[in-house]
Image: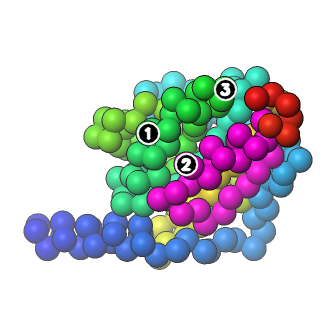
């Protein structure tokens, strides 16, 4: 059993460290200027959350590979650390992975996360956003982020993000977007 636990831990570490560069050829990402594809997915508390429910707010929609892995934990902690700054800018953080609502609930409880994590085990939304990837035989979400304006338009896209500094990048872009729109 200990050997299995070591192997599982090693696989999780490898997942966190290896770049996720596998995209299916037929996937396309929503581009800046396009309307963000709408969706409804279950969150960590079991409630259904729709993108439409955030109309009038900025949305940071980030896709990540797997709950409780090193890179994903770092990224989530940094978004949590900066959550009050995002809220002051009328923005919400929404994370999406192919994990289940129960996995998200455990992740949020263990790591003290208070923003929404949405479960997409059927890969529908991950695919809509061109963020479906593979790690070995596992299907995962690629580490991509979409900044969506209060009217529901994609204004910025990040791919293959660095989880260590991504929250700061998104905050800077949000500030820049708000300045250029004259809403600061």
For residue 81, which numbered disc appears in the image? 1
Q: Image height check: is 164 above or below 22?
A: above
Image coords of residue 131 (percent x, y): 65, 59
The Cα atoms of the two marked residues, 2 and 3, are separated by 15 Å
Image point 84% across, 51% down: which residue? 32
Image coords of residue 105 (percent x, y): 37, 36
Residues in magenta, as a range: 154-178
Find numbered disc 1 in the image and state the secondary structure of the residue it sits on.
Answer: helix
**What is the quadrant of the N terminus in the image?**
bottom left
The Cα atoms of the two marked residues, 2 and 1, are separated by 9 Å
Between 121 and 77, the one nearer to me in the picture: 77
Image point 41% across, 67% down: which residue? 16
Image point 34% across, 66% down: which residue? 12
Find numbered disc 2 in the image and state the secondary structure of the residue it sits on.
Answer: helix
**What is the quadrant of the C terminus in the image?**
top right
Magenta stretch contains residue 172: yes
Image coords of residue 108 (percent x, y): 37, 37
The earlier-in-sequence mark between 2 and 1 is 1
Find numbered disc 3 in the image and state the secondary structure of the residue it sits on.
Answer: loop
Q: Image height check: is 69 above or below 24?
A: above
Q: Do the residues labelled 2 and 1 touch (CB within 8 Å)?
A: yes
Position of 181 with respect to 140 (left or right) is right
The earlier-in-sequence mark between 3 and 1 is 1
Q: Image height check: is 13 above or below 56?
A: below
The earlier-in-sequence mark between 2 and 3 is 3
Report which residue position mark 3 lands on.
90
For residue 167, which numbered disc appears in the image? 2
């Amino acid at each position: 059993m200990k050997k299995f636990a070591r192997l599982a831990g090693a696989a999780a570490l490898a997942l966190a460290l290896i770049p996720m560069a596998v995209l299916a050829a037929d996937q396309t990402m929503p581009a800046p200027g396009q309307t963000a594809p709408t969706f409804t997915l279950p969150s960590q508390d079991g409630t259904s959350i729709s993108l439409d429910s955030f109309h009038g707010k900025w949305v940071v929609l980030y896709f990540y590979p797997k709950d409780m892995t090193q890179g994903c934990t770092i990224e989530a902690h940094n978004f949590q650390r900066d959550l009050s700054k995002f809220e002051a800018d009328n923005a919400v953080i929404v994370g999406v992975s192919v994990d289940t609502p129960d996995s998200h609930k455990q992740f949020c409880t263990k790591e003290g996360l208070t923003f929404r994590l949405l479960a997409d085990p059927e890969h529908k939304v991950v695919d809509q956003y061109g963020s479906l990837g593979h790690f070995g035989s596992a299907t995962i979400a690629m580490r991509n982020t979409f900044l969506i304006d209060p009217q529901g338009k994609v204004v910025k896209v990040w791919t293959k993000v660095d989880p260590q500094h991504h929250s700061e990048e998104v905050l800077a872009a949000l500030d820049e977007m708000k300045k250029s729109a004259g809403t600061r």
